[in-house]
Image (tube, grey):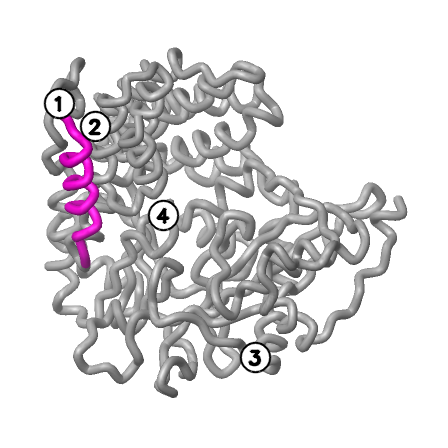
């Protein structure tokens, strides 16, 4: 079609930078209608030509701040239409273990840090196994399904790894005390003052205490350990050098009807900076090396030469991972048959993404995930069973055209909380079901419970504020 055949415009870096200064309200209209494309991003470490991909993300839901604000504007201004991500790729991109394995299976292991997955269960010798798998030096522990730096713990000294693992994993079955009557049938005395106190308690958590809360509330029963990677020094505030993370935005066109290949376009790159400069002797290892979108020292521009070198690597590798049809459900079933709970999580994620595209395939995948989560007797299975039940609730809620069926969903959210009482997402969604029943005090109490379990669960803050107004 003419849309597919239109030549892409050539934009200079100066034009892209000019767009970065515009406010969203002043964004220029699209140059002309273009093909539908997947808007994605890559976070990576870059040093002297060496690229180490940390994770992939959806550009529409990722934050592009400061020096990166021009990237989503450029996607729009180049005329790309929004292409929904293939549900199977969504499952892979949103799970760091599956992402790592996809790179390895495609012969791209060299683009990833040395890494391995481990069950979310502490045991004697675990620290030694992690060190053996990550090279024996500094390492990073990650929850496989979280974003925004939540639960990312960098460990500088190998001799302290065992202590950190105990702090994260031995508290996994503990749950912070919810506010009064948060999970009872009738809420009598919860007030807006109490809700505010709960929110303040949640946001006051910092450091390892905050990360431990994320690990406790996580719905997966595997975590990823990676070797620590550095970036080349990046000048930040005050002219100081930072160990930043490079974020690259890209647009991947859908394959045309007469070609199996997918064209990929660079949208831009910028540095995300950690909280502290690399030479800050008073800062922790985390503060000097972990960059995230909800804080840090800000952002910095990426030099054109570095951008070109990084893109030369990503331009050929990303389509191999992300092209629709590259991977499918049978591949997942075969790849993870020896890790049933990880497979169950992947199938549930696929089901949630596919329900509006292929309802039959989605429900078949969810039922398979339920069977896997019910048959596995491992210690972490309650987490995955809770996640699968929550997914059933959400799919049930979306099952009625033009109407959200909160009544049916509520029973599944209750079951998810029964399977894992410290499931922050299930607590929030159960609160939403109460909200639409006009049970505002109960809804507020459940949102408080969600926040105490996971302080970074942003929707719960928003809904709690709404409950305060009613």
Secondary structure, mark 3, is helix
- Residue sitting farthest toward the front: 469
Q: Position of residue 394 (x, y in %)?
A: 42, 24
- Cα–Cα span, label 3 and label 4: 28 Å
Secondary structure, mark 2, is helix
According to the picture, the residue beneath numbered tag 1 turns out to be 181
Answer left or right for 216 relative to 87: left
Whether residue 224 is visible to the viewer of this picture, yes or no, is yes
Q: Is residue 368 above or below residue 14?
A: above
Q: Quadrant of residue 107?
A: bottom right
Find out whether the residues at labels 2 and 1 contact each other: C-beta distance under 8 Å: yes
Instruction: State which region is magenta.
Output: 190-206
- Picture residue at 34% right of the left edge, 43% below the top: 458
Secondary structure, mark 1, is loop
Front tag of 4 and 2: 2
According to the picture, the residue beneath numbered tag 3 turns out to be 306
- Residue sitting farthest toward the bottom: 239
Checking the image for residue 146, the label placed there is 4
Find out whether the residues at labels 2 and 3 contact each other: C-beta distance under 8 Å: no
According to the picture, the residue beneath numbered tag 2 turns out to be 445
- Picture residue at 17% right of the left edge, 57% below the top: 208
**In the rendered structure, which disc, 1 or 3, sits on the residue that comes first in sequence?**
1
**In the rendered structure, which disc, 2 or 3, sits on the residue that comes first in sequence?**
3
Secondary structure, mark 4, is loop
Q: Position of residue 301 (x, y in %)?
A: 52, 76
Q: Nearer the viewer, residue 21 or 279?
A: 21
Q: Quadrant of residue 221?
A: top left
């Amino acid at each position: 079609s003419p849309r597919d055949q239109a030549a892409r415009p050539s934009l200079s870096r100066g034009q892209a930078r000019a767009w970065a200064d515009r406010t969203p309200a002043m964004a220029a209209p699209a140059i002309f209608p273009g093909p539908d494309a997947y808007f994605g991003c890559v976070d990576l470490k870059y040093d002297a030509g060496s690229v180490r991909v940390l994770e992939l993300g959806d550009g529409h839901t990722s934050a592009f701040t400061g020096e990166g604000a021009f990237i989503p504007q450029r996607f729009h201004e180049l005329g790309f239409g929004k292409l929904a991500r293939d549900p199977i790729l969504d499952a892979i991109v949103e799970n760091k273990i599956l992402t790592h394995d996809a790179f390895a299976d495609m012969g791209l292991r060299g683009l990833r840090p040395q890494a391995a997955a481990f069950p979310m269960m502490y045991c004697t010798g675990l620290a030694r196994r992690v060190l053996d798998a990550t090279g024996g030096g500094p390492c990073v522990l990650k929850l496989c399904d979280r974003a925004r730096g939540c639960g990312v713990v960098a460990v500088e000294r190998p001799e302290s790894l065992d202590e950190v693992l105990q702090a994260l994993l031995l508290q996994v079955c503990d749950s912070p005390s919810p506010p009064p009557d948060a999970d009872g049938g009738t809420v009598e005395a919860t007030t807006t003052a109490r809700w505010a106190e709960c929110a303040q308690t949640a946001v006051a958590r910092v450091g390892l205490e905050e990360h431990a809360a994320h690990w406790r509330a996580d719905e997966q029963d595997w975590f990823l350990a990676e070797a620590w990677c550095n970036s080349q020094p990046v000048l930040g505030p005050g002219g100081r050098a930072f160990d930043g993370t490079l974020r690259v935005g890209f647009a991947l066109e859908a394959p045309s009807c007469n070609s199996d290949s997918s064209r990929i376009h660079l949208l831009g790159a910028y540095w995300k900076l950690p909280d502290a400069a690399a030479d800050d002797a008073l800062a922790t290892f985390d503060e000097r090396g972990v960059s995230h979108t909800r804080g840090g020292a800000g952002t910095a521009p990426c030099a054109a030469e570095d951008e070109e070198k990084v893109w030369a690597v990503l331009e050929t590798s990303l389509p191999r991972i992300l092209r629709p049809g590259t991977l499918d459900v049978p591949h997942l079933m075969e790849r993870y048959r020896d890790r049933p709970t990880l497979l169950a999580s992947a199938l549930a994620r696929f089901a949630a993404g596919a329900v509006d595209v292929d309802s039959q395939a989605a429900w078949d995948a969810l039922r398979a995930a339920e069977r896997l989560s019910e048959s596995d007797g491992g210690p972490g299975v309650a987490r995955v069973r809770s996640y699968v039940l929550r997914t059933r609730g959400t799919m049930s809620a979306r099952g009625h055209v033009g109407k959200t069926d909160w009544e049916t969903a509520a029973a599944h959210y209750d079951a998810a909380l029964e399977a894992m009482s410290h499931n922050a997402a299930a607590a929030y969604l159960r609160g939403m079901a109460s909200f639409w029943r006009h049970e505002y005090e109960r809804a507020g109490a459940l949102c408080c419970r969600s926040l105490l379990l996971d302080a970074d669960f942003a929707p719960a803050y928003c809904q709690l504020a709404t409950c305060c107004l009613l």
